[in-house]
């Protein structure tokens, strides 16, 4: 097989950018084309629901990763922004692009991410937003600047961060969550409830087990009609009800799909020369021996670089394995999770949820498989290292006891 | 090689600690502590990984 000379990356967010940078760092001197649906240069998303929404006289922080000069000049990227990929011809080896000529590739990285789910029948309704893109964040920020009354639909991480930003501005917030337990999939029942209590402490009105029946314009504002028959009046509605992998452009391409793009442990798709990275990739994580799709910063960055290097040197392709990690900031509290949440047992080992600060460990069989730290930043990465090494549950409990004893000694001395 | 930490950018997310725990540690207050600012022998690869993995781009490597 000849060495690929043309690398094409579809999706100009974190994973796409890291694919470009990873390819160059590996010594690739061929052409790189980066195709992005949005008009913006690649930018960072986590701040959009955090610092970006805070009251700031100087305006919100710019989350652009690299300048155009860096991308085109230093990295030698043919940058196609505002160009949505509409199809993939794997026989001909070309990416079809809306309003442009087909882009030929020798090696391809799919990094099209995920698309925020929209509440039914609200598309185009003024004042109703999702929060995924920079444009979304700018619209939400403007409404918060206007001191709009906020209703958040969905008590997941994005919704909770938006609620937090509004409370920090002193605005009233109601969060409506259809499930009885928020964050069940991300944290499990017990810890989902424990984190939900952070809303109560901050004065956010969290309504659990309440569905949204309809959303409509209501005079100057928006009426959010709930399943219990009541109506909430809002100036701003933000839907944080999850995201779906952006794969519709791959329909009929021959690339196997299953909740994202199906990949093996090296991030290779079912089609030779085509790899995937980031939120769109559903790959086999060797560390846990199971397939997973993550919507996390860390894995998107790492997968981007790995997918590009593997696509360019498939004979030397290396597997990508990771202990998943995500974080979220609510009301000045940092929530960090490592590992996977489905577990046989969850045990609080440090602190106390009643105080709003704690560490919980997740056990699967005799192994430590997850850890949640709420305002315990010095603990969390030690557990990530342990999970990566296949640490036993008992060793993790011993470690927790030792940390707690050390903390007590420190407190006693102070 | 030396490790440079920009405390104005660092928010203590700790990915560096999980990749290179002998060099980086987030303390109880969420501040990053470096056990050394000189890259120890044999640690360059993991420190490089830590630098590139920082979501706030708070870490850099420089020649002495």
Image (spheres, rainbow, N blue to C red):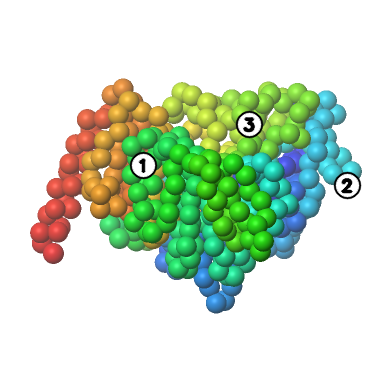
Instruction: Let me know if residue A281 appears in the view.
Output: yes
The residue under the point 44% across, 47% down is A207
Identify the residue at image location x=53%, y=73%: A56
The reply to whether label 3 and label 1 mark residues of one chain is yes
Residue A248, position as x, y percentages in the image: 73, 34
Residue A71, compared with residue A279, is above or below; it is below
Toward which corner of the image does residue B29 lie, by quadrant? bottom left
Counting residues from the N terminus, which is met first, the one under dot 2 or under dot 3? 2
- For the residue labelled by badge 1, is the local secondary structure a helix, a strand or a loop? helix
Question: Mark 2 vs mark 3: same chain?
Answer: yes
Quarter of the rendering occupied by the C terminus of chain A: bottom left
Task: Please state which of the two labelled residues, at mark 2 or mark 1, is closer to the viewer.
Answer: 1
Residue that mark 3 sits on:
A260
Q: Residues within 10 Å of mark 3 (few under 14, many from 20)?
A: many
Could you tell me which residue is drawn at 43 percent across and 50 percent down?
Answer: A206
In front here: A134 or A32?
A134
**Residue linked to disc 1:** A193
Label 2: how many Cα within 10 Å (few below 14, some 14–19, many 20+)? few
Tell me if A380 is positioned left or right of A41 in this view: left
Q: CA distance from mark 2 to mark 1?
A: 48 Å
Can see residue A319? Answer: no
To which residue does mark 2 refer? A99
Residue at image position (29%, 40%) is A360
Q: Nearer the viewer, residue A89 or A305?
A: A89
Sequence-wise, the earlier of marks 2 and 1 is 2
């Amino acid at each position: 097989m000849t060495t690929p000379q043309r690398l094409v990356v579809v999706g100009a967010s974190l994973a796409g950018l890291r694919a470009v940078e990873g390819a160059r760092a590996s010594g690739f001197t061929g052409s790189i084309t980066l195709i992005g649906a949005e008009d913006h240069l690649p930018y960072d998303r986590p701040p959009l629901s955090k610092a970006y929404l805070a009251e700031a006289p100087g305006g919100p922080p710019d989350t652009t990763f690299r300048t155009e000069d860096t991308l085109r000049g230093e990295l030698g990227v043919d940058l196609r922004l505002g160009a949505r990929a509409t199809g993939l011809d794997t026989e001909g080896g070309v990416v079809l692009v809306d309003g442009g000529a087909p882009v030929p590739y020798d090696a391809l990285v799919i990094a099209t991410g995920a698309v925020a789910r929209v509440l039914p029948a609200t598309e185009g309704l003024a004042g109703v937003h999702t929060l995924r893109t920079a444009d979304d964040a700018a619209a939400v920020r403007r409404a918060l600047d206007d001191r709009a009354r906020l209703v958040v639909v969905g008590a997941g991480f994005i919704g909770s961060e938006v609620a937090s930003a509004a409370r920090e501005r002193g605005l009233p917030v109601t969060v409506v969550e259809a499930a009885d337990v928020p964050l069940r999939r991300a944290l499990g029942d017990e810890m989902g409830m424990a984190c939900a209590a952070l809303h109560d402490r901050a004065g956010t009105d969290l309504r659990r087990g309440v569905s949204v029946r309809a959303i409509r314009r209501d005079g100057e504002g928006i009426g959010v009609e709930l399943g219990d028959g009541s109506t909430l009046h809002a100036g701003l509605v933000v839907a944080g009800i999850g995201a779906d992998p952006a794969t519709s452009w791959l329909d009929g391409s021959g690339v196997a799909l299953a909740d994202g793009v199906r990949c093996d442990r090296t991030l290779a798709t079912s089609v030779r020369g085509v790899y995937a990275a980031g939120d769109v990739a559903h790959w086999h994580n060797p560390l846990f021996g199971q397939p997973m799709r993550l919507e996390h910063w860390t894995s998107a960055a790492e997968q981007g670089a790995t997918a590009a290097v593997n696509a360019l040197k498939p004979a030397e392709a290396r597997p990508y394995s990771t202990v998943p990690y995500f974080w979220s900031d609510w009301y000045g509290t940092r929530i960090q999770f490592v590992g996977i949440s489905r577990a046989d047992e969850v045990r609080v080992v440090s602190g106390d949820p009643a105080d709003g600060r704690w560490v919980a460990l997740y056990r699967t069989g005799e192994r430590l498989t997850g850890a949640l730290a709420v305002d315990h930043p010095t603990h969390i990465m030690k557990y990530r290292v342990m999970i990566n090494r296949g640490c036993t549950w008992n060793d993790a409990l011993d470690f927790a006891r030792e940390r707690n004893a050390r903390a007590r000694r420190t407190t006693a001395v102070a | 090689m030396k490790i440079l930490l920009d405390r104005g950018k660092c928010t203590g997310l700790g990915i560096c600690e999980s990749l290179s725990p002998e060099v980086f540690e987030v303390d109880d207050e969420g501040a990053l502590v470096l056990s050394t600012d000189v890259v120890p022998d044999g640690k360059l690869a993991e420190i490089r990984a830590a630098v590139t993995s920082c979501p706030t781009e708070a870490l850099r490597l420089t020649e002495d």
